[in-house]
Image: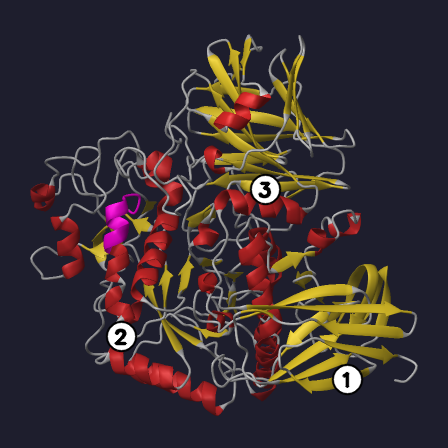
């Protein structure tokens, strides 16, 4: 617990608040359409305010306390204002206020004290500035305060521990190595300054467009008021109106980008450990999976595959022929993923190509005085690439070629917050990062590289975060090192004002981007990228796992809201280490965790060096059988899960969802964190406590069926369900259409010769996406198939419409099962089909 007594009081500087509006400037409707301008400027004394209307449900608000706005940065993550399609909106300027009206919302800026409030079409307010304090600044910080409406709840915020709803909590955005995190941990590996606020019939999102240290206070300091604060020198945020969570995420991911469709094999089971320390151990691991008939697609290699922890090398003793190993694993159906850290061993005159190239081209981060920065990670003294620079990302991406050339199919990016010590590991040092005044990034303004214009996030830098040297990395261990004088920079490339203070939160994101772009250049098929650290928009480049969790029941429980809030932050391809990374799982904990892990978008088992082995078979026959059953179920559900990934790539929808996502007007769902939806149709109510075999389950409005027994329930209702160790409670919504396939030991073991459509009575429409699971769909080599179900009284009609698209599905049998009633089967030729089912005949 923090020390409350014996501390001296802290006096903060007072806030200077924005003044009243003294002038308003905008183009009329005809001019706006002609010039594509959608910004209204407000003079507020010495400060300036801008409101840009980017879409009918999207606003951007910017406040420059000095009157000078920061230019766009080369590494910005938000779509540039000019890239949004133009649309009509009205501006009305009166003596008291300026009102902006779109087809979805109305925005009112009250000129007295410059207060902003938004209204939906039913005149319900949202994102309303607080009456006492709206926007303000002081030395080193700028902030805004808004009202918390009655019955309003808050979700998202990126990677967060604790429960689902973050009301009355403080959430800080500053990437850090959150080792040994728990329910009270604030800063985490990811920093995603986005959330959504929901209440009955009203929902909106806020993207705080700052890469500096920032913080949300959701009514903790002052009940009824939420605050966002950044240590930049400009306030820049977006308001996204829903009202549904799906609407908010659709617009947010249009703003920050959506995930690419991953290779289908990445949706299978991954096995990992720190470490499978030799080729012999890896081969034995692969044999065990195949002999025991436990499906697995991916084996991860942690840091011990390297030579002395040097990135982009292999240990000649433990992995003497990596190309043959990777090839042999591929023949057995395994893809190989290797870990890469950003720290490059400091090794002059040792013929270490990564270090030599980085020094020769001046790719590593330097201090403000030009001296090379170093810290300590696995290879001991190390230097670090400046991934904010495009030439460094190009170089780092091309280094992946040494791995892809031997068949490596994916890269796992770790330690990229960055996680650094000021002394060698084991010497009791402190965690540090780059000096906050270290220059980083390209000169000038650049392009995000989408081919759609300059994606931007512009913030300034004013003031350093408080804290001591160990916390904030101001003293970093390389002072007075005579051996580094030869590497002092002579002609600095850093002729801009961007420092680590501004871009710390971007380091992991840019490493993941460098990796993803390199794999795209050097592999013909889709690749897998995994990262520990990231920022808003990380979904465009990588999947994410929740770092070093522990083998505790509390961490199993916490994984559900953690992953759901990541999904509600636009990051859908996420997972937690099944069984827990640190510590030893019991057989019961591991069995329950594997059941939950079947639902994770990223299904990976992982454990630490100092722990007992955590493979599915080490806990005895009963646990092994449970693991096999639920991994089998995962593979059977792959057509359904792959469809969810396609939906995420198209719309930004999460794959694993809290119930509030689909039932946002149901107050019971607002704090319900321990039941989750896999897509819209399949709901799980996992067991996350030892010795528990019964649990209460809430079923929202509608018809629900027990997955295992097909017992029918009518919601909203609570039930008590039996859940012995072999059973995780699963429920299906009425009208659900769940495509399934036969079990395979790995995704590409053989063509899928049977598609099983499990359908429950009700009314629904489903679009089935299919492709080869490997190549990019940009060439339109995919197919779409609409499937509908409609039920009236005891009669149900199922229609399968004609296949559309260029993907030619190999011949297969399709089984259409109306669960509990009957089934039909046919040989699929891509045509249309129609069947009638009668429950009377069943």
Give SS at disc 3: strand
Whether residue 51 appears in this view of the structure is no
Q: Which residue is mark 2?
A: 406
Occupied quadrant, residue 472: top left
Q: Residues within 10 Å of mark 3 (few under 14, many from 20)?
A: many
Name the residue nearer the viewer: 131 or 662.
662
Whether residue 809 appears in this view of the structure is yes
Look at 37% across and 54% down and name the residue there: 512
- Residue 78, numbered circle: none
Look at 49% across and 22% down and name the residue there: 63
Q: Nearer the viewer, mark 3 or mark 1?
A: 1
The reply, left or right, for residue 204 in relation to residue 160 is right
Which quarter of the figure is the C terminus placed in?
Answer: bottom right
For marks 2 and 3, the one nearer the N-term is 3
Q: Residues within 10 Å of mark 2 (few under 14, many from 20)?
A: some
What's the image's color scheme? secondary structure
Q: Which residue is mark 3?
A: 195
Q: Nearer the viewer, mark 1 or mark 2?
A: 1
Pointer 2 with pointer 3, Cβ within 8 A: no
Magenta run includes residue 11: no
Pointer 1 with pointer 2, Cβ within 8 A: no
Q: Which residues are magenta?
A: 387-395
Q: Which residue is mark 1?
A: 823
Q: Residue 779 placed where, x, y %? A: 45, 63
Marks 2/3: CA distance? 42 Å
For marks 1 and 2, the one nearer the N-term is 2
């Amino acid at each position: 617990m923090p020390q409350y007594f014996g501390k001296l009081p802290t006096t903060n500087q007072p806030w200077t608040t924005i003044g009243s509006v003294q002038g308003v400037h905008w183009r009329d409707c005809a001019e706006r359409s002609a010039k594509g301008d959608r910004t209204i400027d407000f003079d507020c004394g010495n400060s300036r305010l801008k409101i840009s209307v980017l879409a009918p449900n999207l606003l951007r608000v910017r406040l420059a306390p000095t009157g000078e706005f920061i230019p766009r940065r080369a590494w910005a993550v938000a779509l540039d204002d000019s890239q949004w399609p133009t649309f009509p909106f009205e501006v009305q300027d009166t003596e008291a206020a300026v009102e902006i009206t779109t087809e979805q919302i109305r925005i009112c800026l009250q000129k007295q004290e410059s207060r902003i409030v938004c209204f939906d079409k039913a005149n319900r307010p949202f994102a309303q500035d607080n009456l006492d304090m709206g926007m303000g600044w002081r030395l080193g910080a700028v902030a805004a305060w808004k009202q918390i409406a009655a019955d309003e709840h808050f979700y998202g915020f990126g990677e967060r521990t604790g429960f689902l709803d973050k009301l009355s909590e403080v959430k800080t955005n500053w990437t850090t190595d959150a080792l040994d995190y728990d329910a009270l941990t604030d800063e985490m590996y990811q920093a995603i300054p986005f959330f959504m606020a929901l209440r009955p019939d009203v929902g909106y999102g806020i993207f705080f467009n700052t890469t500096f240290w920032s913080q949300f206070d959701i009514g903790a300091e002052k009940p009824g008021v939420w605050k966002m604060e950044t240590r930049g020198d400009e306030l820049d945020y977006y308001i996204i109106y829903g009202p549904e969570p799906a609407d908010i995420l659709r617009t947010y991911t249009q703003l920050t980008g959506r995930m690419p469709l991953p290779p289908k094999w990445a949706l299978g089971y991954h096995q990992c450990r720190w470490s499978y320390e030799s080729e012999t151990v890896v081969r034995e691991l692969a044999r065990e999976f195949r002999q025991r008939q436990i499906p697995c697609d991916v084996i991860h290699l942690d840091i011990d595959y390297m030579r002395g922890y040097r990135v982009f090398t292999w240990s000649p003793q433990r992995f003497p022929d990596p190309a043959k190993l990777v090839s042999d694993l591929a023949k057995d159906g395994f893809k190989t993923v290797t870990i890469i850290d950003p720290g490059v061993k400091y090794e002059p005159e040792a013929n270490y190509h990564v270090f030599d190239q980085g020094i020769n081209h001046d790719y590593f981060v330097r201090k403000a005085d030009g001296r090379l920065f170093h810290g300590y990670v696995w290879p001991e003294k190390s230097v670090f690439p400046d991934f904010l620079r495009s030439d460094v990302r190009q170089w780092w991406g091309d280094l992946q070629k040494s791995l892809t050339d031997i068949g490596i199919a994916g890269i796992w990016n770790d330690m990229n917050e960055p996680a650094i010590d000021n002394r060698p590991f084991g010497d009791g040092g402190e965690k540090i990062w780059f000096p906050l005044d270290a220059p980083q990034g390209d000169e000038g303004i650049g392009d995000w590289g989408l081919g759609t214009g300059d994606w931007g996030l512009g913030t300034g830098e004013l003031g350093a975060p408080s804290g001591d040297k160990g916390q904030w990395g101001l003293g970093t261990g390389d002072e007075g090192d005579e051996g580094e004088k030869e590497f002092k920079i002579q002609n600095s490339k850093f002729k801009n004002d961007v420092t680590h203070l501004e871009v710390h939160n971007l380091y992991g994101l840019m490493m993941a981007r460098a990796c993803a772009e390199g794999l795209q250049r050097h592999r013909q098929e889709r690749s897998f990228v995994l990262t520990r650290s990231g920022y808003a928009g990380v979904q465009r480049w990588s999947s994410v796992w929740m770092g070093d969790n522990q083998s505790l029941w509390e961490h199993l429980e916490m994984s559900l809201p953690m992953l759901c809030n990541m999904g509600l932050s636009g990051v859908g391809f996420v997972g937690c280490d099944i069984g827990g990374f640190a510590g030893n799982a019991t057989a019961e904990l591991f069995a329950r965790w594997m059941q939950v892990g079947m639902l994770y978008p990223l299904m990976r088992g992982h454990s630490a060096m100092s722990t007992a082995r955590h493979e599915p078979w080490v806990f005895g026959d009963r646990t092994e059988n449970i693991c096999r059953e639920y991994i089998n179920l995962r593979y059977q559900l792959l057509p359904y899960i792959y469809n969810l990934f396609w939906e995420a790539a198209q719309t930004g929808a999460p794959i694993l969802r809290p119930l509030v996502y689909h039932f946002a007007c149901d107050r019971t769902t607002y704090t319900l964190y321990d039941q989750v939806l896999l897509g819209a149709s399949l709901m799980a109510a996992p067991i996350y406590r030892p010795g528990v075999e019964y649990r209460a389950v809430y079923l929202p409005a509608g018809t629900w069926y027990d997955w295992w027994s097909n017992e029918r329930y009518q919601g909203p209702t609570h039930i008590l369900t039996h859940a012995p160790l072999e059973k995780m409670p699963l429920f299906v919504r009425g009208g659900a259409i769940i495509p399934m396939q036969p079990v395979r030991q790995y995704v590409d073991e053989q063509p899928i010769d049977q598609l099983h459509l499990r359908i429950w009575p009700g009314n629904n429409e489903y679009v089935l996406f299919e492709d080869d699971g490997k190549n990019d769909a940009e060439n339109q080599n995919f197919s779409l198939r609409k499937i509908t179900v409609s039920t009236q009284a005891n009669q149900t009609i199922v229609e399968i419409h004609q296949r559309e698209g260029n993907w030619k599905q190999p011949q297969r049998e399709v089984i259409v099962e109306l669960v509990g009633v009957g089934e039909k089967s046919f040989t699929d030729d891509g045509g249309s089909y129609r069947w009638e089912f009668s429950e009377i005949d069943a």
